[in-house]
Image: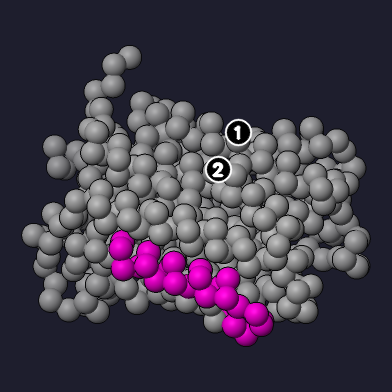
Amino acid sequence: MKNQNPLSGYQWMVVAILALTQFTVVLDFMVMSPLGDLLMKDLQVKPYQFGIVVSSYALAAGLSGFLTAGFADRFDRKRLLVFFYSGFIVGTLFCGFSNSYEQLVLARIVTGIFGGVMSSISMAIVADLFSLNQRGRVMGFMQMGFGLSQILGIPISLYIASKSNWQMPFYMIVCLSLIMLLAITLGMKPVRSHLDKKTDHSAFHHLLTTIKNRNYRIGFMATAFMSLGGYFMMPWGSAFAVNNVGLSQNELPYLFMIVGVSTFLTMPLIGLLADKINKFQLFMSASIVMIAAVLIYVQLGQTTMFILILVNIFMMGGIMARMVPSQALTSSVPKLHDRGAFMSINSSLQQIAGGIAAIIGGKIVWQANPNAPLMNFDVLGYVVVGVIIINIYLTRRVYLYVERKAKEAA
């Protein structure tokens, strides 16, 4: 079938720049977990202290998103992207310079303040430059950054860290980010169309007005529950694979890599599918797949690596196939002059919800000792299923609002 909404050459370049930029930000966040063992031994920190290192990024990112939401629609989006990406690079460089627990926590806070806003700015740019019928493909390519971080980023980072020290992966991320900063500066045009439609003179009033909008709040809730479902189990994946399923530490990079390859290959296909069929139907189908995969996953005992990889592929596929249509729908909720504020608040809630999910998950699962199996992991799975069901209801409301809005515009 001929594509009725082809992307221009410039649009493809913007997609590539945003996707690779997102790759560096995602890698910076995700690399902390696999580096945990090396980092804790080198800095001599306890597990709960390492948890503070990880959560400091999310909390700083969430707070930053709220503080910048009122100003997000008052500047050229390209300038905002350059400013926050530059801050992210500085924060990541500080992570590499850190030689103590206190320095690393401070560096992660700085990185979170700037890096946590990157996703919302990128989403606002996508919503400004691409029509609704193009966004599924664009979101699919944007999410490839997640797959790339697993295919290349995490294994390479682990290898570099094992051959030198845990700081080296952060220097690698800084080098890649500087290249992408140059690409943004030279390759992207200003994104200013939203500036012609400003209605508020007060940034704080603009923020409050965005939060008070009932239709916007439905979108926020849908995003929050999407993050809850994803982050409940993510922090415990490695511990579950080693202590419950029986994988060795040496096999973990292969697990990340193979699942990442499958995610990388399927994301563009999911994006194309999201532009050709009903987005909510795709979301619903992916949710059913994820529910089935989660229920099987949490019941796994000692089994083969093949079975674990297969279940992880279906579970990760379900997560990503829900995320693409959900983000495409959510990006259509705000009006043009509210888009930056909406995306900033949305990104903040995503970060905060992820942090809350990790805290609740830590209260549900427990270990008798560091080498013992995780207990109550099945209970965590049932909680995730409940969250997915609530998210289906909320996303349906978002879909109905977007459909009604499109009919009114027509």
Q: CA distance from mark 1 to mark 2?
A: 8 Å
Q: Which span of residues is magenta-colored?
A: 81-105
Instruction: Please rate how many residues cluster around mark 2, counting C-alpha atoms within 10 Å: few if below 14, some from 14 to 19, many from 20.
Output: many
Residue 203 lies, with reference to residue 406, above or below; the image says below
SS at circle 1: helix
Q: Residue furthest front?
A: 164
Q: In the rendered structure, does residue 238 fall within the stretch colored magenta?
A: no
Residue under label 1, please give it: 262
> Which residue is drawn at the image coordinates 43% and 48% (left, top)?
20
Q: Is residue 316 left or right of residue 222?
A: right
> Which residue is drawn at the image coordinates 64% and 54% (left, top)?
157
**Residue 81 image position (x, y, % from top left):** 31, 61
Closer to us: 139 or 352 = 139
Closer to us: 367 or 119 = 119
> Contact (CB < 8 A) between labels 1 and 2?
yes
Q: Quadrant where the N terminus lies?
A: top left
Q: In the rendered structure, does residue 83 fall within the stretch colored magenta?
A: yes
Q: Residue furthest top?
A: 1
Residue under label 2, please give it: 147
Residue 199 lies, with reference to residue 31, above or below; the image says below
The mark found on residue 218 in the picture is: none
User: Mark 1 or mark 2, which has the lower sequence index?
Assistant: 2
Q: Quadrant where the C terminus lies?
A: top left
Total count of labels: 2
Magenta: predominant secondary structure element? helix
> Which residue is drawn at the image coordinates 65% and 70% (left, top)?
359
**Residue 50 image position (x, y, % from top left):** 69, 74
> Which residue is drawn at the image coordinates 24% and 79% (left, top)?
204
Report the amino acid beneath label 1. Answer: Ser
Q: Is residue 329 left or right of residue 286?
A: left
Report if residue 262 is visible in the image: yes
